Image (cartoon, rainbow, N blue to C red):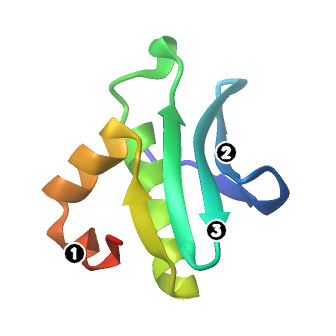
Amino acid sequence: MSIEIRHEASASRFVAMVEGEACVLEYQLVGSTMTITHTGVPASLGGRGIAGQLARFALDKAKTEGWKVVPACTYIAAWIEKHPEYQELLA
């Protein structure tokens, strides 16, 4: 399932609207360090890989911008552990 994700930099989040519901990845950016604080997908949309797509999109943005990442969100910490190609981003 491919979804459209948009970066709302002014709100420090990435958002995907799926079936009329917002799926979000929220972060704080201080200097060049992105602390990912929350990943949320409504239960009705769970199990479709949406959170993983949000994670990949956000981490690809961090890589492009040269940001380091602090995975304060437990989902993101576990996701990065399963995707070693993103471990170089860890602060």
Q: Amino acid at mark 3?
A: Val
Q: Is residue 80 left or right of residue 12?
A: left
Residue underneath mark 1: 85
Q: Secondary structure at mark 2?
A: strand
Q: Is residue 73 left or right of residue 2?
A: left
In the drawing, what numbered circle is on residue 30?
A: 3
Above or below 29: residue 3: above
Q: Whole-Å distance between the Cαs marked 3 and 2?
A: 20 Å
Find residue 39 and report its horizontal and vertical position in percent: 49, 37
Q: Amino acid at mark 2?
A: Val
Q: Secondary structure at mark 1?
A: helix
> Cβ–Cβ below 8 Å for labels 3 and 2?
no
Residue underneath mark 2: 15
Q: Secondary structure at mark 3?
A: strand
Q: In which image quadrant can residue 22 be found?
A: top right
Q: Earlier in the sequence, mark 3 or mark 1?
A: 3
Q: Amino acid at mark 1?
A: Glu
Q: Earlier in the sequence, mark 1 or mark 2?
A: 2
Find residue 89 and report its horizontal and vertical position in percent: 34, 76
Find residue 37 and report its horizontal and vertical position in percent: 51, 43
Q: Nearer the viewer, mark 3 or mark 1?
A: 3
- The residue depicted at 43 percent of the width and 40 percent of the height is 51
Q: In which image quadrant can residue 61 be found?
A: bottom right
